[in-house]
Image (cartoon, helix red, strand yellow):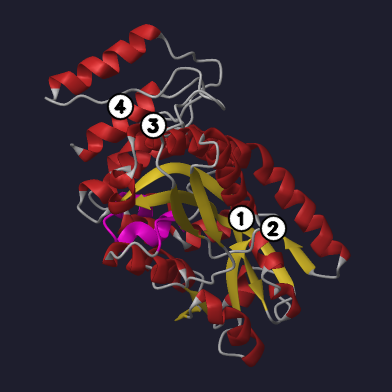
Amino acid sequence: MKKKLIVSVLCAAMAAGSLAGCGLKSPDEPTTAAAAAETTAAAAAGGETTAAAPAGGGSGAYNTDDMPEVTLVYAEVNPLDTIVGQMATDFKTKVEELSNGKIKIDVQASGVLGSENDVLDTMLGGGGTIDMSRISAFALTSYGGEKSMLLSLPYTFVNRNHFWNFATSPLAEEFLLESQENGSGVRGLYYGEEGFRHFFTVKEIAGIEDLKGMKLRVSNDPVMNGLVEGLGASPTVVSFNELYSALQTGVVDGAEQPIANYKSNAFPEVAPTLILDGHTLGAVQVIITDEAWEKLTVDQQAIIMEAGKYASEQNRANSEKKENEVLEQLKGEGVNVVEVADIAPWQEATKKVIEDNTKGREDLYQQILDLQ
């Protein structure tokens, strides 16, 4: 069965509020009989037949009596009490509800299965030990998802609504399916976000000028390397699982994470200054291996997609609230939270990394900017 067609049919057949191109649609858009007929006709035109997801969704909407039981291992590098950890829990709960327990999601959180790159290497290597994962969009750039790099460029999203305008636009499917179309062996299912990312440091700082000469932790990513260099600092590659000890021992002077991840991973203990520069919004995808996807029945695939829609919507509703709550907790615990009154110097310092990483895709990047 043609891989892209499967996803397109499932997305089109989803219940109200489904992922537009596997991104969210407005919750008041009903699934009509005509739409279902169109998806069936599209499948027939491709020389294939596939069953559409049952209209309406919800518990009892799927025939689970004869559904085979399956367990999908879901890797999450952060703890369950983070924004993305909660998204994993929401997804698990909804999948198991819709399938009457026939599909179980085994969430392995807190990085027990390795860093994001470790997880991707395992998923792409085959063997089926990890079926699904929540991955930062920029982590996919070395795995067939080059367009996802555009989502992590500094100061691309001016606010959360801007990001969700993208995630609900027709561009969403193009980005989600890129890795699979490039033959990587994984496909994107839905989008989420984990809040704006900010720098935090061991020593007290007051502004951008204090970052000069610092060793700042990065993953092995060209955008983050360029961002840190633009700020006059030295990018230093350290595995996420080793970051706490690297901060503690002086291997690095600082790093960057969303606020909730900063707290949940106990980084304030060793790097108690947080500067709210908001250089990127932590755009994430939940991905599944082609191997795992193709073993699922059509109803099971539809359940995965419906649960993904639900988890994405919950993430959108809860992320900012959770972030604000954590920020107040951090202030109350004595973290030195530095506000950035003028973002212009930060934007100027990072112009080169944007220019370097949009070459050949200027029009596509402009489409993202225009969605604000």
Residue assigned mark 1 = 85
Q: Earlier in the sequence, mark 3 or mark 2?
A: 2
Q: Amino acid at mark 2?
A: Asp
- CA gap between label 3 and label 2 equals 30 Å
Residue assigned mark 2 = 81
Residue assigned mark 3 = 299
Instruction: Indicate the secondary structure of the residue bearing disc 2.
Output: loop
Instruction: Write down the region rendered in magenta.
Output: 130-149
- The answer to whether 195 appears left or right of 157 in the picture is right
Residue assigned mark 4 = 9
Q: Amino acid at mark 3?
A: Asp
Check the image and report above or below for 161 versus 346. Answer: above
Please give the name of the residue rendered at 64% of the width and 76% of the height, measured from the top-left corner: 210
Answer whether labels 1 and 2 touch (C-beta < 8 Å).
Answer: yes
Please give the name of the residue rendered at 57% of the width and 79% of the height, measured from the top-left corner: 243
Q: Picture coordinates of residue 13 (x, y %)? A: 38, 22
Viewer-proximal residue, 346 or 224? Answer: 224
